[in-house]
Image (spheres, grey):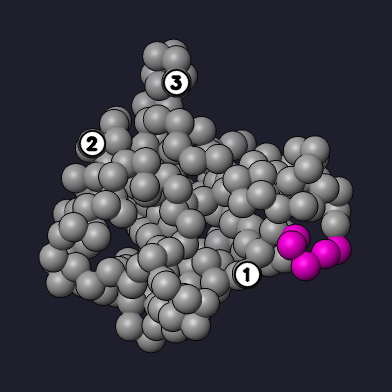
């Protein structure tokens, strides 16, 4: 990220955090990945049961490794040895998880968060179940409006993730959304988080870096 982009982000982060507060969501700003990791570990008490969605941004700041190696009960669905165990760990997320870690596909400057899912385990956990949700958000994910956040999620993040997973959807093949209706579709469920019903459940760490897709 260019230094002038970072300067602009420093100027606008305060307004974004105020907008999140109006939506019952607590916001933090970290200048670096290292600072973001420290904030995240200060938020999540040791001994907590922790799970995550794809959380590529959280991996980039070192949070998932820190949880795996630390004094936490980590529900490691990605390390599951068979589909049945993976499904059980995903289900356990709803009843046992203290902190669910996720990235976002797009977020507006006024605090609306948009996420798109294929299997929907991630968006379902964001909406309901885990006691707390912690978003790790690179400032590259912040766009002007809710419509822009949706467009970023569907037309930028989804094709990149489809290619990352090796899917044979139109976007996985040519990088462009084809509005497909097929089993491998990665845009099955779209979640717009505009307000947190329960105060202190959702927290967002804004990071002044390019993170995720």
Local SS, label 3? loop
Q: Is residue 25 at least partly visible in the picture?
A: no
Neighbor class of circle 1 (other Cα within 10 Å; few <14, some 14-19, many 20+) is some
**Pick the front one: 206 or 99:** 99
Where is mark 2, residue-wise?
Answer: 34
**Pick the front one: 26 or 189:** 189
Q: Is residue 167 at least partly visible in the picture?
A: yes
Local SS, label 1? loop
Distance (Cα) linking label 1 and label 2:
31 Å
Local SS, label 2? helix
- In the rendered image, the quadrant that contains the N terminus is top left
Range covered by the magenta-colored residues: 181-185
The quadrant holding residue 92 is bottom left
Neighbor class of circle 2 (other Cα within 10 Å; few <14, some 14-19, many 20+) is some
Q: Where is residue 61? Give x, y as percent.
A: 32, 41
Neighbor class of circle 3 (other Cα within 10 Å; few <14, some 14-19, many 20+) is few
**Main SS class of the magenta portion in the image:** loop
Reply above or below: 97 against 12.
Answer: below
Nearest-to-viewer mark from 3 and 1: 1
Q: Who's the residue at 61% across and 36% down the image?
A: 144
Q: Where is residue 102? Give x, y as percent.
A: 44, 57
Which of pointers 2 and 3 lies earlier in the amino acid sequence? 3
Nearest-to-viewer mark from 1 and 2: 1
Q: Which label is found at residue 131?
A: none
Q: Which label is found at residue 1?
A: 3
Total label count? 3
- In the rendered image, the quadrant that contains the C terminus is top right
């Amino acid at each position: 990220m260019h230094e002038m982009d970072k300067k602009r982000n420093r100027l606008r982060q305060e307004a974004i955090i105020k907008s999140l507060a109006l939506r019952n969501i607590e916001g933090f700003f970290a200048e670096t990945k290292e600072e973001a990791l420290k904030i995240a570990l200060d938020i999540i008490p040791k001994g907590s049961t922790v799970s995550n969605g794809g959380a590529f941004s959280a991996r980039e700041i070192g949070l998932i490794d820190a949880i795996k190696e630390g004094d936490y009960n980590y529900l490691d669905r990605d390390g599951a040895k068979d589909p049945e165990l993976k499904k059980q760990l995903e289900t356990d997320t709803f009843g046992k998880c203290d902190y669910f870690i996720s990235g976002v596909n797009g977020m507006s400057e006024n605090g609306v968060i948009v996420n798109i899912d294929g299997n929907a385990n991630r968006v379902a956990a964001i909406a309901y179940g885990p006691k707390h949700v912690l978003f790790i958000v690179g400032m590259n994910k912040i766009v002007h409006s809710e419509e822009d956040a949706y467009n970023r999620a569907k037309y930028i993040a989804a094709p990149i993730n489809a290619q990352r997973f090796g899917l044979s959807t139109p976007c996985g093949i040519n990088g462009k959304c084809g509005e497909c209706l097929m089993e491998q579709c990665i845009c099955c469920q779209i979640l717009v988080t505009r307000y947190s019903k329960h105060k202190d459940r959702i927290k967002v760490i804004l990071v002044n870096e390019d993170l995720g897709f």
